[in-house]
Image (cartoon, rainbow, N blue to C red):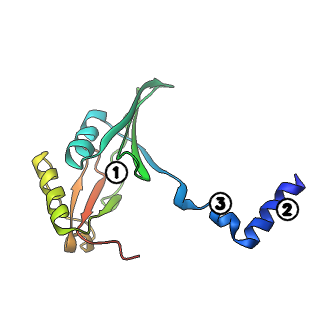
Amino acid sequence: MLPVVTSMMMRARSGRWREEHSMDTVKLRVARPTRDLEAVVHFYRDGLGFEVLGRFEGHAGFDGVMLGHPGAPYHLEFTVERGHEAPRAPTAEHLLVFYVPDTEAWAEQVRRMEAAGFAAVTSRNPYWDAHGRTFEDPDGYRVVLQGAAWPR
């Protein structure tokens, strides 16, 4: 075991460890429970344009769906535990924020949400209303479509 630790320490000192284990290469899954799988699929697929990447049923008492964009570095997973009701979002500040820098693409995304039957809600934090629109999913979690580029 000592040679592995020594090797890792040497790579960390040289900067190679950071290059080899960069967070740039990982995929992010945001997973949470829902009360209604089909309702969240409608919101994220039909409203936001995500694709269903996978589904499962009866996995240790859970049913679920993964939504995202093929090749994107992130996706969302929603699960229902049979016999249990998931709580609604604890606050109006539980957000997913998508920065859409192109003005026309942002306006089209807002229109898509509205066409799917979702109306914008007033954000608890007025910052998000200045350049964006906030929509609430069926469980009370909010998605902000921010009409701006991420500045960092």
Q: Position of residue 47 (x, y in %)?
A: 20, 47
Count up the numbered dots: 3
Who's the residue at 22% across and 56% down the image?
A: 135
Mark 1 or mark 3, which is nearer to you? 3
Mark 3 = which residue?
20
Separation of marks 2 and 1 at Cα, in angstroms: 46 Å
Residue 16 vertical placement versus 47 (above, below):
below
Residue 89 is marked as 1
| Front tag of 3 and 2 | 3
Q: Earlier in the sequence, mark 2 or mark 1?
A: 2
Give neighbour class at mark 1: few <14, some 14-19, many 20+ (Cα, 10 Å).
some
Asked whether the viewer can see residue 84, the reply is: no
Residue named by callout 2: 6
Relative to 142, residue 127 above or below: below
Q: Which mark is residue 62?
A: none
Determine whether, in the image, residue 139 is placed left or right of residue 63: left
The amino acid at mark 3 is Glu
- The mark lying in front, picked from 2 and 1, is 2
Amino acid type of the residue tagged 2 in the rendering: Thr
Q: CA distance from mark 1 to mark 3?
A: 37 Å
Q: Amino acid at mark 1?
A: Ala
Tell me the residue at 26%/65% (across/down): 100
